[in-house]
Amino acid sequence: MQAKSPMQRMNETSDTLEIWWDSSPLVFESWKKARLKSKPLEEREEDEMILDSYYISDRPMDQLFMGVTTNPPLSGAVIKDDPGFWREWVIEQRRKDKKVSAHELWWRTYKEIVKRGAERYLGVFRQTGFKYGYISGQVDPRDYENEEEMKRQALELKSLSSNVMIKIPGTEQGVRVLKFLTSRGIATNCTLAFILPQFVAVANAVKDGLEIARRDGVDMSYWRSVITSMTGRYEELGDFDKESERVGVEITETDKRWASIAIFKKAMRYLEEGGYPSKMLICSMRPGPVVNDKEEQWHFEKLAGANAVFTCPPKYINAIDSCEDIELDPDAWKEPVPDEVIAKLNKFQYFREAYDPAGLEIPQFNTHPSTIATAEAFSKATDEMENFVAEALK
């Protein structure tokens, strides 16, 4: 009998735990081929059987991945995976519409990538009664403070396919857009979110939008809400290291990992105890920390069994699947973070603001260091996609 992979074993720790593919479905086959090529010949057959179970086009109910998240860098990877095809696609679009600008043609290209990816998961979407099989399509990250433009883009993305879930940033403007979209019965995924005050604000906005939708008799058949916690980015892009020097308290990789896990666990409890309709989603997971000379996988190990979505990029899947001795306790998510860890983390304002539901006001979300850094990275990736289109037109 074939041994189950760590990804498969994680999936079995809870009936409500979901594992999603954090990349475009259009690059799955390329990743699969590259991974198999990296394996010794004697391991390829077994590994291929494992990978084949992650995405099964003709038997979607038997596959591991129950949804998809994408963002501009991941969509840009689709173009890099087959630049010749997409260059010709862009040129053909210009032939059909000679007046189209490079910016508008980039937007069409991006929507085409989202649409083609959504088609790959329609089987899951339909066979689960629209509960699973969503694919997140993100609005332009360069417009994360432009409320009306995000609304316009969101409605266009939603028109692509019934299983498109709109990814909106957790900024002041984004919170209002999430309420608006929910009131229209449109599935949403809050991104650029790192801290409990954001999760609370989004959960309340979604709840309010849902009440409006029900009052107005809106069809909610295709509606769902997830709130993303960008854990690794919170750990790496914020003020931990700067504050460590200022207050004279050492901050380790282990401390940072505990911080994001503590925030995520508290967020899950908050949603559950408050009866909120949203579900927490964890992304930007990282291997580690190293404990007693061994690399642990705490983003999985400490949250096993959780009622949450774990969206996993190819690189992280490779790391997890290489850890055959990983321990996955279905009750791990219930275990509290040690008191002494919380006491140490509370010496950092960066953590206190993130762990307190009222730690920041909504307008402050836009200036959180992780928000700014992530928005800049995503905007750069979007610029690269648009530059590709412009070069193709030359």
Image (tube, rainbow, N blue to C red):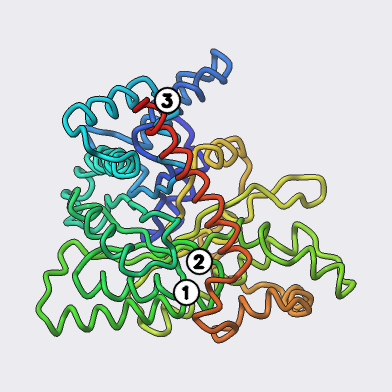
- Say if residue 273 shows up in the picture: yes
Report the residue at 48% width, 46% height from top. 312
Residue to which mark 2 is pinned: 193
Amino acid on which the number 2 mark rests in the picture: Ala
Point out the tag, 2 or 1, that comes first from the N-terminus.
2
Q: Please identify the quadrant where the N terminus is shown.
A: top left
Residue to which mark 1 is pinned: 199
Is 159 on the left-hand or right-hand side of 68? Answer: left
Nearer to the camera, 55 or 227: 227
Residue sticking out furthest to the top: 41
Sort mark 2 into few (<14), some (14-19) or many (20+) by Cα contacts within 10 Å: many
Mark pair 3, 1: CA separation: 35 Å
Amino acid on which the number 1 mark rests in the picture: Phe
- Residue 184 position within the rendered picture, expressed as x and y whole percent measured from the top left: 19, 71
Residue to which mark 3 is pinned: 30
Decide: is 254 above or below 207: above
